């Protein structure tokens, strides 16, 4: 018998961490901590952050320590037990075939002389995440095409994720195994640990959560999500025929405003009403 009665998989930034423009209800994080302290809850963080930045967030925002964490944009799954963070090797074995047995140093060698790409610091890399800085102001298409062409020539299946770091004024390129995404990592953890669909809920706020939000998992979009993310998520679940699997937080749950952790708990209670009892004082 699985003991994990409710499994919450949640994004961190602007989902349980109130680091956006909207206000946070003061009770929201204390109630999230109460949920996480319940013996039948399992908490999984799903984030682009690496282990160091995940631990910083937990300390700086007084977040509950999770049971598992999917970090590094889906390339690493940690099991957290007694303060120790252990990598789940089975996940590494699951995604390794995409790179044909090569690791990120091998891939870096293939891309070594591409103009405009500069390797990020060691702590931002792992075996299955190769990360570069790039130019901020050029369109990245030609650069990304060149990277894709070189990897494909070696039979390497990679996803290439380009983003802009507005504060640092540079582009960022992550090269990941094609199958190492948040949705696949969550599904893998669910199979591995025997978490059932009906007991598992995902929560997120932004474009990089969309693939999970619209996947047919029970999912919650917090109220502080940007309007365009809400519209796209609604449209895609409607097209897929499972609109009822996505809950849009609207506020009002236990007198809270539906932003951040308040929205996460509101959505959890929508799918699994008995957690209300866990939150009672
Ligand atoms: Mg977020």
Image (cartoon, helix red, strand yellow):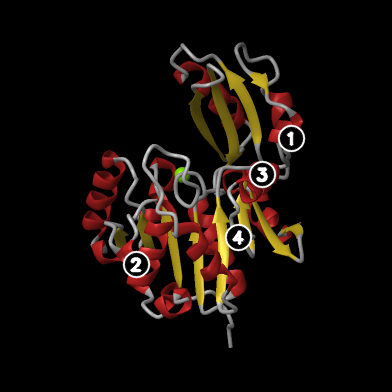
Residue 208 in the image, given as x and y percentages of width and height:
44, 42
Q: Nearer the viewer, mark 3 or mark 1?
A: 3
Task: Calculate the distance from the C-alpha at mark 2 to the C-alpha at mark 1.
Answer: 41 Å
For marks 2 and 1, the one nearer the N-term is 1
For disc 3, the marked residue is 56
For disc 2, the marked residue is 254
Q: Nearer the viewer, mark 2 or mark 3?
A: 2
For marks 3 and 1, the one nearer the N-term is 3
Q: Which mark is residue 14?
A: none
For disc 1, the marked residue is 123
Neighbor class of circle 1 (other Cα within 10 Å; few <14, some 14-19, many 20+) is few
Q: Which mark is residue 64?
A: 4
Residue 72 in the image, given as x and y percentages of width and height:
62, 44
For marks 3 and 4, the one nearer the N-term is 3
Give the residue furthest to the bottom.
Answer: 1
Q: Nearer the viewer, mark 4 or mark 2?
A: 2
Q: Nearer the viewer, residue 145 or 192?
A: 192
Give the structural element (helix, strand or loop) at label 4. loop
Residue drawn at point x = 46 percent, y = 70 percent: 200
Residue drawn at point x = 65 percent, y = 38 percent: 129
The reply to whether residue 205 is visible in this rendering is yes
- In the rendered structure, the answer to whether residue 86 lies left or right of residue 19 reads right
Considering only vertical position in the picture, is 5 above or below 47? below
Task: Calculate the distance from the C-alpha at mark 1 to the C-alpha at mark 4.
Answer: 24 Å
Give the structural element (helix, strand or loop) at label 2. helix
Residue 46 in the image, given as x and y percentages of width and height:
54, 53
For marks 1 and 4, the one nearer the N-term is 4
Q: Are marks 1 and 4 in contact (CB under 8 Å)?
A: no
Neighbor class of circle 3 (other Cα within 10 Å; few <14, some 14-19, many 20+) is some
For marks 4 and 2, the one nearer the N-term is 4
- In the rendered structure, the answer to whether residue 206 lies left or right of residue 143 reads left
Task: Calculate the distance from the C-alpha at mark 4 to the C-alpha at mark 2.
Answer: 20 Å
């Amino acid at each position: 018998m699985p003991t994990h009665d409710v499994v919450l998989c949640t994004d961190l930034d602007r989902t349980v961490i109130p680091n956006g423009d909207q206000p946070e209800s003061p009770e929201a994080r204390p109630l999230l901590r109460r949920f996480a302290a319940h013996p039948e809850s399992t908490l999984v963080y799903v984030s682009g952050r690496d282990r160091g930045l995940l631990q910083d967030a937990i300390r700086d925002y007084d977040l509950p320590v999770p049971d598992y964490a999917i970090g590094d944009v889906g390339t690493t799954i940690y099991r957290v037990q007694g303060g120790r963070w252990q990598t789940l090797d089975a996940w590494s074995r699951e995604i390794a075939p995409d790179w044909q047995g090569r690791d990120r140093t091998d891939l870096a060698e293939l891309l070594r002389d591409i103009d405009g790409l500069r390797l990020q610091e060691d702590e931002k890399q792992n075996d299955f995440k190769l990360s570069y800085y790039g130019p901020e102001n050029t369109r990245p298409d030609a650069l990304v095409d060149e990277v894709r062409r070189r990897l494909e020539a070696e039979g390497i299946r990679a996803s290439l994720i380009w983003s802009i770091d507005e504060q640092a004024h540079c582009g960022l390129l992550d090269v990941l195994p094609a199958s190492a995404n948040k949705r696949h990592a969550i599904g893998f953890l669910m199979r591995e640990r025997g978490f059932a669909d009906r007991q598992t809920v995902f929560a997120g706020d932004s474009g990089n959560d969309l693939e999970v939000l619209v996947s047919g998992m029970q999912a919650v979009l917090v109220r502080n999500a940007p309007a365009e993310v809400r519209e796209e998520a609604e449209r895609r679940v409607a097209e897929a025929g499972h609109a009822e699997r996505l809950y849009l937080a609207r506020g009002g749950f236990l007198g809270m405003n539906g932003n951040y952790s308040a929205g996460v708990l509101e959505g959890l209670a929508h799918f699994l009403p008995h957690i209300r009892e866990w939150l009672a004082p």
